[in-house]
Image: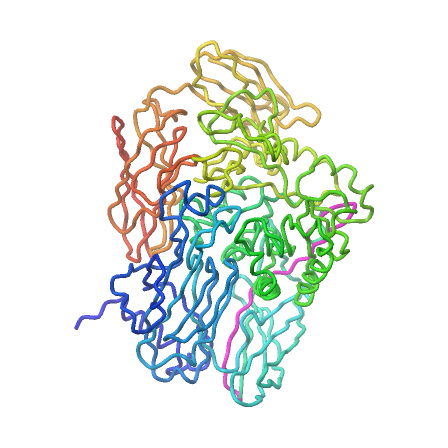
Amino acid sequence: MKVSKMEIKYKLLWLMLFWSVGTFAQTRVRENFNKNWKFFLGDEPGAKSPAYDDLSWRKLTLPHDWSIEGKFDEKNPAKPEGGGLPTGIGWYRKTFNTPSNFQNRLVTIEFDGVYKNSEVWVNGKYLGKRPYGYASFSYEIGKYLKAGKNIIAVKVDNSAQPDSRWYSGSGIYRNVWLTSTAKIAVANWGSFVTTDNSGHIEVQTQLLNKTMNAQSVAVSHAIYASDGKLVLKSSAQTIQVSTSGGAAKTTLDIKNPKLWSVENPNQYKLITQILQNGKLIDTYETRFGIRSFNFDADKGFSLNGKAMKILGVCLHHDLGALGAAVNTRAMERQLEIMKAMGVNAIRTAHNPPAPEFLDLCDKMGFLVMDEAFDMWAKKKTKNDYHLNFPEWHTRDLEDMVLRDRNHPSVILWSIGNEIREQFDSTGIAMTKELVATVKKLDQSRPVISALTETDARKNFIYQANALDIYGLNYNHKLYKDFPKNYPGVKFLATETTSALETRGFYDTADTIRRWPKDGKTKFTEGNKEWSASSYDNVSAYWGSTHEETWKAAKKYDHVSGLFVWTGFDYLGEPLPYPWPARSSYFGIVDLAGFPKDSYYMYQSEWTNKPVLHILPHWNWEAGKSVEVWAYYNNADEVELYLNGKSLGKKSKQNDDLHVQWNVTFEPGTLKAVSRKNGREVLTREVKTAGAPAKIELLADRKTIKANGEDLSFVTVRILDAAGNVVPDADNLVNFKVEGNGFIAGVDNGFQASLEPFKASYRKAFHGLCLAILQSTDKSGTMKLTASSAGLSASSITINTGK
């Protein structure tokens, strides 16, 4: 019988996983457990039984979000606020084999996140339930395993709706891992490294002992630099470990350490080894960074002694057309787009993120405000976390801190967002309890909560006097007098702006509008396009425009920084529009990853690279008066030309963030030239486009890994015969993929589109749409062809390799 390469690889991994011979008999092995699952959408109570027949179930690889695969419908229980996609109950099952000698090992299955109310069985034995959809958790399963075939079953219940104020996704949407260790080992999340800029390091190691007796072991540590070179190694420390566990503390010193910063995110690797009777029985890896930071009531924030403003955005966890299913490349792309804009910080709104997200922030140089909850005991929606808070909040908060406390990117623990106990005296005791829970596990970072009640006498979370920093949402007009009203209190703008924009849509820019005007009046403004102007002149009633907000935040040193709501559009919360709107308008970048115009305002303010961006497009009715804006930096002035004729020079005055001209439209070329000391810095042109004629495909990467996970994001542009993007093009584009890949999702960034994300077609929106290509496990190529009636087709080839 011929055995496939995948079968050979799978068996080898299991030989490694459970002790067979050699080194792997003694050390830890952690393997990805995502492949070869079966899935059934619906309630199947018998599915927990090993005897259940699942032959007809769908085969898939995790992470998986079944909601994103569904059809948009206003009647779906999650409602438009939850993205208008289906939820319900789903079952997952996986069959796997174990060698006969697994009894000598401690075997653990680890779930990075299941949304939500997960219940797990192994061989019909119930392991437990975890309600919170954003929690990472694990179960020991060794005692339930048997030689040969084993079956794990997972029930996911996201049927009680509405349970979120945005799109949550449904299913085992984060990674799953299987870990095998000796029965004496470092506990899960059992290593904690704290540092200072001198290179002094303290290591706390928590050990577990699943043998029947107390044991004596030796603990040693080695530190490696980012280039793999050994920096130092400690001597072994003998520890007595009872059956309830044990702990070791060690201090180490690195000479001339390389610091972690947003510009140079240097990391070290700590390798902890456990030996018994001279034999290595466990190895545990901890990545960390050496950095210091400080919040000051007068001077704001500093990192490694250098003053800097926190330039942050809030991000929800969905990945657009991919839904909530975690994909490292998709998260990396989001962060790359944010980094290019000048962002140096992320707020994980309003829940713990995927572990891989924090790994990326460590690697790429982002500061992180790590957030636990969107509500405590008082609800925001009928079936939200308030139902689980009394029983689970301590465990969920502890697990977030234990999991994330070694990440150098994490500088703040947030215990909640706009918590309703602000307005209730119960908030005092709850705040003290939650802060104490965090401080018990980590005293190296401040604790914050994002507050909305601006009267300190009425804000009971503030009255607890337990928070390290005052976090204020919105209310930018209060920044100026904060030191007077709260003397000696450290301040951070934890959520700001809530401006509304639709990419590529423009109407009058002469007035600022609040949509809706308040929380009670029915929204009757807007337009038939279900759009908001990409001129920065519309915000929610509680917020402000991008320029209004940034002008206030940049002006005062005591404002440590800000987190703009939001970096990207996200599924759900489609304020201010009713159905068919089903995703937010708040993003600086749309759901497909295409920047809106405000992106360039931030880029001109938050980066040093030369920026010149003009808006809007140049396809209008003859004679129409059009307001032309230019964002720029590194220049004294911008001169605007229409068809070669100068329309005058403009310079930013006072606190201006853009310059503008009122121009009577005539077709042709609108050109802007920025100059410094009379010398040209940049030139940008916008041309009147003709009729759609052809398709252009642009891949963010033309070579990706053949690992079944990697992605290439292909931008589809509808061009006229001269190669200009047609700003009103809405052509239906059909996609075909040949070779070693497939379409993982399609999108166009329009907040009210009801086209499916899992499809082989997409209409362009303002001239653009997106196809997301995913690799298989086979090396080679995949070819994407895009076609549309009446247009010249286009193809692009993506290479995949190991």
Q: Is residue 543 left or right of residue 489?
A: left
Looking at the picture, how far across and down is residue 229, in whole percent? 54, 67
Colour scheme: rainbow
Q: Which residues are magenta?
A: 277-303
Q: Residue at x 71, y 25 (%)?
A: 654
Q: Quadrant of residue 769?
A: top left
Where 85 sits versus 153, above or below?
above
Q: Residue furthest left?
A: 1
Where 664 sits versus 601, above or below?
above
Q: Is residue 247 left or right of residue 618?
A: right
- Is residue 268 visible in the rendered image? The answer is no
> Quarter of the image containing the C terminus?
bottom left
Q: Residue at x 56, y 54 (%)?
A: 351
- Is residue 145 visible in the rendered image? The answer is yes
Q: How many labels were placed on the picture?
A: 0
- Relative depth, front residue between 282 and 477: 477
Magenta region includes residue 286: yes
- Relative depth, front residue between 525 and 291: 525
Q: Residue furthest top?
A: 623
- Give the dominant element type of the magenta stretch: helix, strand or loop: strand
Looking at the picture, how far across and down is residue 693, in whole percent? 30, 24
Where 83 sits versus 547, above or below?
below
> Quarter of the image containing the N terminus?
bottom left
Looking at the picture, how far across and down is residue 709, in whole percent? 37, 55
Q: Quadrant of residue 791?
A: top left
- Relative depth, front residue between 251 and 398: 398
Q: Quadrant of residue 287?
A: bottom right
Magenta region includes residue 439: no
Where 700 sits versus 267, above or below?
above
Looking at the picture, how far across and down is residue 39, in whole percent? 33, 60
